[in-house]
């Protein structure tokens, strides 16, 4: 053990090609590769302290000693895994803080579990490289593995040797695009993404989605490599609708959108068709809309989205770094 306390900061990420459905729900092996971008403005800070004085694991969220039930269990499972890995038995105190509302479709589990994984691995003295940390974080929450590497990221469902983790395909400065995030509600969503993943299999269209995935991932990566914005945008928008088509046709159906979500979808398409501003929407498991645009259009787009009824807050994100250890602890 090197120290008693470690803190990590991890970004949220937005998927251009989605992770929706798993082949192993316990270890969170995804049914397909996905492609994402780390976000510059949304992150989680997580401090983990270990001590002989602690009689159990304790977790607080935003300073409140919360986290009970399923959420606590998910966090203590991460601690248990790192204890197993290092042969240690000390309990931990965990504090975690997001700078954005959780469970509204801004990937709070991605940043949260990436930060927790990195801090826990550090404080218990497990020596993991980036790839191993991505594998470790994946098992806590699938999308967390994509918040480990920097910039534009691909999560490999299988690397050819039976392992699944995310790798950086381009650094953050590769392409000057933005994710203009329009937050609709600060209420927690009703159906968690973990439940949504399990329901995906019940959609009659799910197998068709999976069949099209390899070609779609390749096309999107090519548009990213060529910085072909219009093609890139068309692909990511179609992919978001494809994922939500699975949600809508699952049994029971999962509808993540709210009325302002639909207003934004319509407006984004209309602004684009009128030549006012070229952006493309994507939506995760929640009502929040992510409008992807060129950096020079982000101010104009943010203003337009903020004027739509029901939009509570708009935040412009650039491509960001992956997880990092930081010196300033939360307690
Ligand atoms: C809709 O990572 O939240 O954001 O592995 O069960 O924790 P678990 O699921 P989670 O999946 C969310 C997926 C998504 C799409 C995406 O980001 O790829």
Image (tube, grey):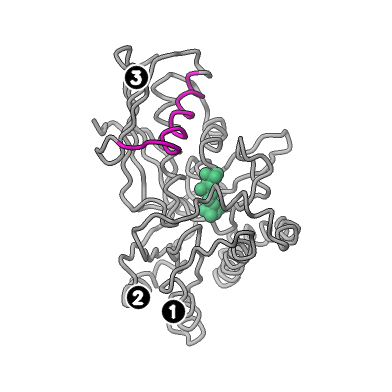
How many residues crowd mark 2 within 10 Å: few (<14), some (14–19), many (20+)? few
Viewer-closest of 52 and 169: 52
Q: Is residue 288 left or right of residue 199?
A: left
Residue 135 at what x, y percent from top left? 57, 34
Q: Earlier in the sequence, mark 1 or mark 2?
A: 1
| Residue name at image x 54 percent, y 36 percent | 134
Local SS, label 2: helix
Residue 289 at what x, y percent from top left? 44, 66
Q: Look at mark 2 in the image and give the residue it sits on.
A: 300
Quadrant of residue 308 within the rendered picture: bottom left
Residue 70 within the segment the image draws in magenta:
yes
Q: Look at mark 1 in the image and give the residue it sits on.
A: 277
In the rendered image, the quadrant that contains the C terminus is top left
Q: Look at mark 3 in the image and give the residue it sits on.
A: 50
Q: Nearer the viewer, mark 1 or mark 3?
A: 3
Q: Is residue 225 left or right of residue 95?
A: right
Q: Check if mark 1's residue and mark 2's residue have beta carbons within 8 Å.
A: yes
Local SS, label 3: strand
State which region is magenta.
66-83
């Amino acid at each position: 053990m090197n120290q008693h306390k470690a803190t990590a900061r991890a970004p949220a990420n937005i998927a251009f090609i989605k992770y929706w459905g798993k082949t192993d729900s316990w270890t969170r092996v995804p049914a397909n590769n996905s492609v994402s971008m780390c976000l510059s403005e949304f992150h989680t800070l997580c401090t983990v302290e270990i001590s002989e004085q602690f009689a159990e694991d304790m977790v607080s969220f935003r300073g409140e000693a919360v986290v009970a039930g399923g959420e606590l269990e998910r966090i203590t499972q991460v601690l248990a895994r790192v204890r197993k890995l290092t042969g240690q038995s000390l309990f931990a105190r965990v504090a975690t803080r997001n700078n954005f509302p959780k469970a509204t479709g801004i990937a709070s589990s991605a940043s949260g579990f990436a930060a927790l994984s990195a801090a826990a691995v550090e404080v218990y003295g497990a020596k993991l490289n980036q790839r191993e940390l991505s594998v470790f974080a994946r098992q806590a929450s699938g999308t967390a593995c994509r918040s480990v590497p920097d910039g534009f990221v691909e999560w490999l469902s299988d690397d050819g040797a039976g392992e699944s983790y995310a790798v950086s395909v381009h650094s953050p400065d590769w392409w000057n695009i933005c994710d203009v995030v329009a937050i609709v509600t600060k209420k927690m969503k009703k159906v968690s993404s973990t439940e949504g993943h399990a329901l995906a299999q019940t959609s009659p269209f799910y197998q068709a989605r999976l069949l099209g995935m390899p070609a779609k991932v390749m096309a999107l990566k090519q548009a990213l490599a060529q910085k072909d914005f219009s093609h890139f945008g068309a692909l990511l928008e179609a992919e978001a609708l494809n994922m939500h088509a699975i949600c809508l046709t699952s049994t029971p159906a999962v509808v993540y959108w709210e009325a302002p979500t639909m207003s934004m979808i319509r407006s984004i398409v209309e602004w684009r068709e009128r030549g006012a501003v070229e952006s493309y929407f994507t939506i995760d498991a929640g009502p929040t809309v992510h409008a992807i645009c060129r950096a020079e259009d982000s101010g104009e787009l943010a203003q337009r989205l903020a004027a739509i009824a029901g939009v509570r807050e708009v935040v412009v994100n650039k491509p960001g770094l992956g997880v990092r250890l930081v010196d300033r602890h939360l307690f």
